[in-house]
Image: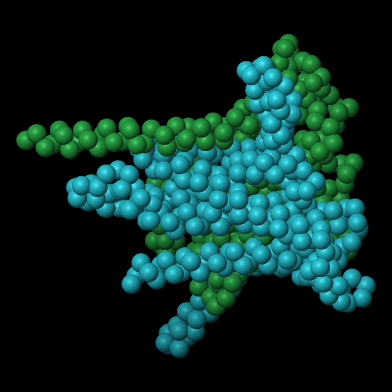
Amino acid sequence: MTTPLLRRDGRTRKMLNRLGFGSFLLPLTLFMLLVFCLPLIGVIRTSICDGDCSLVAYSDFATGKLFHRALTNTLSIGFITGLVSVTCGYFVAYHLSRMTARRRRLFLVLVMLPFWTSILVKSFAFTVILGTDGIINNALQAVTGTDIVIPMIFNRAGVIIGMAHWLIPFAVFPILSSLLSQDKALRDAAEIMGARPWDIFWKVTFPLSLPGVIAGGLMSSVIGMGSFVTPALLGGRRDMMMANLVDFYVREALDWRMASAIAVILVLIALLILSLAAWLRQRQERGAVA
Amino acid sequence: MSTNPSSSGTPMRFLTRNLSLPVLVTWLIYVFLLVPSLVVIPISFGTSNELVFPPQDWGLDLYRRALDPAEGWLSAAGRSTMLGILATAIALLMGVPAAYGLSRSRFPGQKALTFMLMSPIFAPTIVVALALYLYFATLGMTGTMVALAMSHAVVITPFILVTTLSGLKHLDRNIENAAMVMGATRLQIFFHVVLPALKGSVLTGGLFAFLLSFDEVIVSWFIARSDQPTLPVKMYSSIQWEISPVLSAISTFLVAITVVGSVVAAFTSSAETDGI
């Protein structure tokens, strides 16, 4: 037995092992390249080349009134629902963070149930609850004895309510995890120093939970901006978002190039916000080290 | 001395005085979160043809209609179930080994590969739907079960990756090393050591992947044939065009599934949240 042979044996073994990992990763990688990356590249291509090649779809987008409205709708609805979701999510996350682990497990079901409920069930439920002949308006009429009707559906309010309902759980989880990671000794220290609960919250708990708040806010905004079902079912004609515009151009205008261009712009917006989130987190981490 | 009771008493009073409003708001948010899932249940036991809450008469008419083959809900549900099983099978077959490969090796470009495999989570669903629609249209496969199953697999595989990776994190590497010292090959280790130990997270991952696929509407809305809709697609067009009371029976069925899913989710995810 010579050493070189042994070494070669070890090397081949190492190589085989590495190839082994490759074979574990290969099927999914190939699948995703073929059924995810290639189609996405196809979208970019279609947005530029559909028959002939030009940037006409993008210049139309930049100048068109319809596109302008869809863009402002997408950004403002995304921003508002992000804000609403984080605010509501904070209350829930704070409440959950002050429980024993056993109790929290029970209460988490209250967040998980809406999280896992089909968005279609929710949309259907909201049309029944918020409609002109819906539960709220009927109850209001019965109580006040008037035929007052609050328009809460097929308008901006409907979109925001439906979307916040969908996105609050997305905000709860990051906020909850940043609240749970806080050292309780900090709050105890503040209390010993004579701080009142309200001061402890605003000067210790809240600032320390900001990374979670920002992560939750950006996450729910990004998801909200890409949403399609809620504005289609609960919004009015004026609340069309970019996702609905994509659907419109595929299904009704049969203009694949325009649909693709809008999709590309939507992805760019999402990427922009996600990289903002990554940058903020990095800065936060560097700040924590320093 | 007397400082102790007074100092613990003052914060207590502050707590009740200052935090009662936030707690009230929190409970209102819980109600807001739960009501849409629950309100469909009583409506589904009404008999009238109009949506009334609470129902005037009680009965099972809506369930009878939902189960009537002529209405098409049953076949849509069957289609969604089959699709869910197919897509979950594809996702598990590729996702679980891939997660193992990612967690147990280091190679250049690994971060980029991980990002690529996870990216369907971050990409707006409408973009994924459009991309797959154009892709399968060029291939002449739109509306086929194969196209639907592959599309769903794209959407749900990242979730299989996440659950399997978190399961692998808790696995003791020494057991694998021991197997390797005993001469087991990578494949043997994977099938005889890793997979049995991962059973739990693979099962929950598979369950959630199935639920996600069963619930998926946007991709299916683009890919499925309009005369052969999946359950969510049929619901979507039904809510869009005429809000039928039958929807409340379908919704109640879906909420029942969700209750199971969310209880499982709460009990599996709490381990991670508590660990932080």
* Image quarter in which the N terminus of chain B is found: top left
Can you name the residue that lies furthest to the top here?
B57
Q: Which quadrant of the figure has residue A52?
A: bottom right
Residue visible at 63% across and 40% down in the picture:
A161
* Left or right of residue B77: residue A254: right
Instruction: Indicate left or right for B115 with B193 as reference.
Output: right
Describe the colour scheme in one phrase: by chain
**Side of A255 relative to A62 (left or right):** right
Reply above or below: B130 against B4.
below
Residue A166 falls left or right of residue A100: right
B242 over B269 or under it: above or below: above
Q: Can residue A194 be seen from the camera position used here?
A: yes
Closest to the observer, B174 or A190? A190
Q: Which residue is at a point 75% across and 48% down the rendered structure image?
A: A239
Query: In percent of the image, x 43 and y 56: which residue is there?
Result: A210
Identify the residue shown where x is 33% and y is 33%. B17
| Residue B182 visible (yes or no) | no
B249 up-or-down from B218: above or below: above
The letter of the green chain is B
Which of these two is toward me, A244 or B42?
A244
Q: Measured from the top left, where is residue A222 in percent x and y?
A: 62, 57
View extreme (right): residue:
A51
Q: Indicate the position of residue A136 as horizontal and vertical percent values.
A: 65, 26
Of A37 and A73, the residue lying toward us: A73
Tell me the cyan chain.
A
x, y percent for residue B228? 87, 41
Of B171 and B48, nearer the camera is: B48
Pinpoint residue B170: horizontal percent, then vertical percent.
43, 54
Q: In which quarter of the image is residue A104?
A: top left
Number of numbered markers? 0
* Residue occupying the far left of the picture: B1
